[in-house]
Every structure is written in structure tokens, then in C-alpha cells.
Image: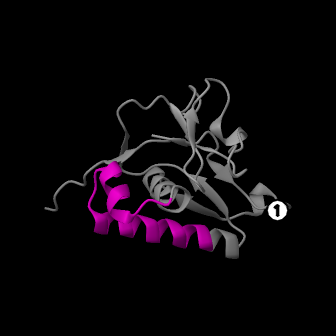
Amino acid sequence: MPRPRRLRWVGFQPNITYFKPNGIRMIDLDESVLTVDEFEAIRLKDLFGLEQEEAAKKMHISQPTFHRLVLSARKKIADAIVNSKAIKIEGGNFKMAPGFRGARAGGTNVCVCPNCGYEESHVRGIPCTSKKCPRCGTMMVGKF
């Protein structure tokens, strides 16, 4: 009997969980399903630019497991883009990180620029993704 899988910690759950190509009816689309833990791995590695070891620690998993999550997520995203599939974010083996309040409940406590690292306090009701960094003009993101 295999050992039970460790739960992967996730610090952000997106409000929007379905993305589709423009101009193709839903009924005509195939889907590529991205798990919430794969989504988190992509967020930490590709959006925040964290090293794999640091991102793996945030998710409470090993670096090789984190690497497999990123590879799997990137493959699914590439498949969806190249083959005009919808991306659906659901499921996975995860639990929300302590202190998580959810994107709908106001998100995180800090907004950060993924480009230059500038940080500012999050204002409840105003998503970080609607703000531009005052230093470099890049769109801000939430941080856990």
C-alpha cells in the first residue's frame, strides 16, 4: 500500500477558475484541468519568480515534488494554448495556508510587484491586480 500523499499548502485561490479561447463556443471546447496545487506552483515560480526550493517550502513539499507540479502545470497550459482548449482550475491535494482569507474575502495582506519586488499594504475591497507598481508600472499581485 502506498503512503498517503502530503497535502500541499496553497496561499491563493483564484476568483476565476475557467479560461477559454475567444470566439469558440463552450460546447465546442475541450478542457485542460489544472489542479489548485499546480496553479499555486505556477504562481510561486513563474509569477513571483521564487526559486524551486523556496517555493517548495512555502507549499510544504519536497523540491522534486514541486518540480513535477510545475512541469505538469506548464504542460497543461501549453496544451490548452496550442490546441485551443479551455483551462479549468479545480481539485488537487491541498489545504489553505494558515491566515488565508480568500480572494473574495479581500485577498492577502500585502500587494507586491512581481517585477521589482515593491510591496504595499492591501486595501480591503480593492484587488491587488487592479493596482500598478509606482516604481515600474507593472501590475501588482497578492502575496502570502
- Closest to the observer, 93 or 56: 56
Range of the magenta residues?
A: 49-78
Quadrant in the picture for residue 14: top right
Q: Quarter of the image holding residue 96?
A: top left
What amino acid type should be assigned to the residue bearing mark 1? Ile
Place of residue 43 in the rendered image (x, y in percent of width and height, measured from the top left): 51, 55
Instruction: In the displayed orientation, state which residue is furthest to the left.
Output: 1
Using a 10 Å C-alpha cutoff, classify the residue at mark 1 as few (fewer than 14 neighbours), some (14 to 19) or many (20 or more).
Answer: few
> Which quadrant would the N terminus be assigned to in this image?
bottom left
Residue at mark 1:
24
Q: Is residue 82 above or below residue 46?
A: below
Q: Is residue 83 left or right of residue 41?
A: right
Q: Secondary structure at mark 1?
A: loop
State the residue in front, 6 or 141. 141
On the rendered structure, is 63 left or right of 134?
A: left
The residue lying at 20 percent from left, 54 percent from top is: 4
Q: Magenta stretch containing residue 89, yes or no?
A: no
What is the x, y in percent for residue 16? 64, 43
Q: Residue at x 64, y 68 (%)?
A: 80
User: Is residue 58 shown to the viewer in this render?
Assistant: yes
Q: Is residue 138 left or right of residue 1?
A: right
Residue 110 % position (x, y): 52, 35
Question: At 43% across and 32% down in the image, what residue appears?
Answer: 100
Residue at x 37% of width, y 69% of height: 68
